[in-house]
Every structure is written in C-alpha cells, then in structure tokens.
Image (spheres, rainbow, N blue to C red):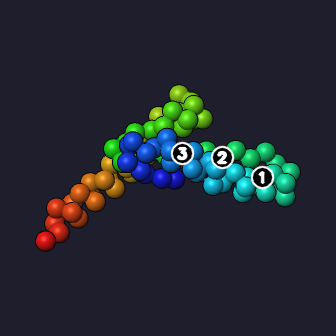
Amino acid sequence: MAIPADRNAMQQEAEKKLKYKNLCTEIQRMWNVKCMIIPLITGNTGLVTKGLKKKFGSQSRKTFDSLHKAAMLGTSHIIQKVLQCET
C-alpha cells in the first residue's frame, strides 16, 4: 500500500507491481497456486488509481471509502503537525 502525491499515483502503482513480481513468481512456484499482485495505491487526497477500480469492480464501495478515509486522515494529521511546528 502507498499513499503518494496524486501526480505520482500511477508511477507508484507500476513500481509496486515490479517490486513484488519476483515474490509472486516464487509463491506460484513453491505452492503451485495462482498469484496476483494488487497494489493498493490511493493519492494523498483520496485519489484511487484506475487499475485498482478494475481489480475490485463496482461492489467495492466500502473498500474505496476506507482507503479514502485513511488517506484523508493521514493528510490532515501531516497538515496539523506542520501548522503546529514553530520555526
């Protein structure tokens, strides 16, 4: 899972797929099962990548709501810390 800046979401998704490709291949080889990489990438303002929407389909409204909530809470926490910081 990653929560990058919105403009980096697609790049982050590609990086995660590449990073875990070897692990997926090893799991398939060791346990003789099918493995699929689904990177959970949501932007810092709640943006969800197109690839994630395709994987989960339309029945995943609760999943997207929780991802949005986590992203928004994390962003607001960072903003609060910055605004409280004395320079």
List the single residue furthest toward the top: 58
Left or right position of 30 against 19: right
Find the distance from the CA under tag 1 to the CA under tag 2.
Answer: 10 Å
Which mark identifies residue 71? none
Q: Alpha-carbon neighbours of circle 3 within 10 Å: few (<14), some, or many (≥20)? A: many
Find the distance from the CA under tag 3 to the CA under tag 1.
Answer: 18 Å
**Element on which disc 2 rests:** loop
**Element on which disc 1 rests:** helix
**Residue 83 quadrant:** bottom left
Q: Is residue 68 visible?
A: no
User: Residue 22 at what x, y percent from top left?
Assistant: 73, 55
Q: Alpha-carbon neighbours of circle 2 within 10 Å: few (<14), some, or many (≥20)? A: some
Q: Residue at x 39, y 42 (%)?
A: 7
Query: Disc 1 or 2, which lies upstream in sequence?
Result: 1
Left or right position of 82 against 70: left
Mark 3: amino acid? Glu
Q: Quadrant of the C terminus?
A: bottom left
Find the distance from the CA under tag 2 to the CA under tag 3.
Answer: 10 Å
User: Residue 59 at what x, y percent from top left?
Assistant: 54, 31
User: Residue 4 at what x, y percent from top left?
Assistant: 42, 50
The mark closer to the camera, 2 or 3, is 3
Left or right position of 17 against 74: right
Q: Residue at x 54, y 45 (%)?
A: 13
User: Residue 11 at what x, y percent from top left?
Assistant: 50, 44
Mark 2: amino acid? Ile
Callout 2 touching callout 3 (CB < 8 Å) = no
Query: Disc 3 or 1, which lies upstream in sequence?
Result: 3
> Can you identify the residue that label 3 sits on?
13
Left or right position of 42 against 45: right
Q: Between 8 and 66, which is closer to the camera in this rendering?
A: 8
> Can you identify the residue that label 1 sits on?
25
